[in-house]
Amino acid sequence: AQKVTQAQTEISVVEKEDVTLDCVYETRDTTYYLFWYKQPPSGELVFLIRRNSFDEQNEISGRYSWNFQKSTSSFNFTITASQVVDSAVYFCALRPGGSTLGRLYFGRGTQLTVWP
Amino acid sequence: EPEVTQTPSHQVTQMGQEVILRCVPISNHLYFYWYRQILGQKVEFLVSFYNNEISEKSEIFDDQFSVERPDGSNFTLKIRSTKLEDSAMYFCASRILSGATEAFFGQGTRLTVV
């Protein structure tokens, strides 16, 4: 079974705080891909990052960083020094590697609100 | 920067009517998808399409739904007889290659069935 769990439904922080969004996944595929997408209030889905199952190196992009740990099946997303513009729903998604065309399995999303 | 374009952005239709949602994927992409998101819920896969045929569909994608790539640029989702529960945001996505690539999503079409 393929499953993504985002246990945090809503998070509120004050600007400049750091915040971590949790993502736990389940898959029996040995090769798979993990993604984070951002959905701002305007509604579109914006791609943030892709991580391959065979690459556990953590990644930092500006204020964003991602911590991938296969041992705990987690792919957490941290925003450092949050800003009001970070307010959005963030989705973690899994694509099993067994299928070439690979549908995405999304978590339920975490609504992040950053207050000024 | 190339992007996936969806039209219309919002459509209101009466129950039982047919609707066609349109998408123009990124031009050199080969894999196409439709997803939907009922308000406040997670994004759900509907169908994937490659080489002019459906490659996978979910249990949501029943006989009321169909997809088509009528020409080299458009990718459409048709709902034959809409129900109230079809009200959702519908996202089109495209991807360039198999393997380690990401899907890029359009801005969505909000469908409201009344």
Image (cartoon, grey):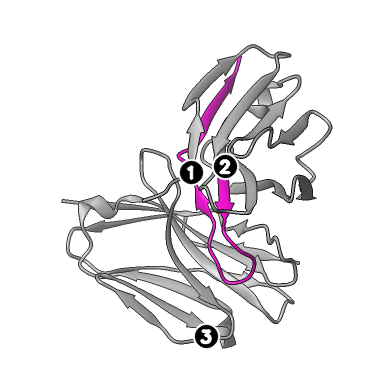
Give the structural element (helix, strand or loop) at label 3. Answer: loop
Q: Earlier in the sequence, mark 1 or mark 2?
A: 1
Q: Chain of mark 1?
A: B
Front residue of this view, candidates A7 and B32: B32
**Residue, disc 1:** B4
Q: Residue at x 36, y 51 (%)?
A: B1
Task: Please state the horizontal and vertical placement of residue A85, each as a whole percent of the image.
Answer: 24, 51
**Residue, disc 3:** A55
Residue B42 shows in this picture = no
Q: CA distance from mark 3 to mark 2?
A: 28 Å
Asked if disc 3 and disc 2 are in contact, CB closer than 8 Å, the reply is: no
Q: Which of the 4 image quarters holds residue A77?
A: bottom left
Say which amino acid is labelled 1: Val
Residues marked 3 and 1, same chain? no
Q: Which of the 4 image quarters holds residue B79?
A: top right
User: Magenta segment range?
Assistant: B92-114
**Residue, disc 2:** B92
Give the structural element (helix, strand or loop) at label 2. Answer: strand
Q: Is residue B35 above or below residue A63?
A: above
Task: Please state the horizontal and vertical placement of residue A34, each as a whole percent of the image.
Answer: 55, 70
Q: CA distance from mark 1 to mark 2?
A: 7 Å
Say which amino acid is labelled 3: Asp
- The number of discs equals 3
Mark 2 surroundings within 10 Å by alpha-carbon count, few (fewer than 14), some (14 through 19), many (20 or more): many
Front residue of this view, candidates B86 and A55: A55
Task: Please state the horizontal and vertical placement of residue B91, each as a whole percent of the image.
Answer: 55, 41
Give the structural element (helix, strand or loop) at label 1. Answer: loop
Q: Is residue B25 left or right of residue A80?
A: right
Say which amino acid is labelled 2: Cys
Asked if disc 1 and disc 2 are in contact, CB closer than 8 Å, the reply is: yes
Residue A104 falls inside the magenta stretch: no
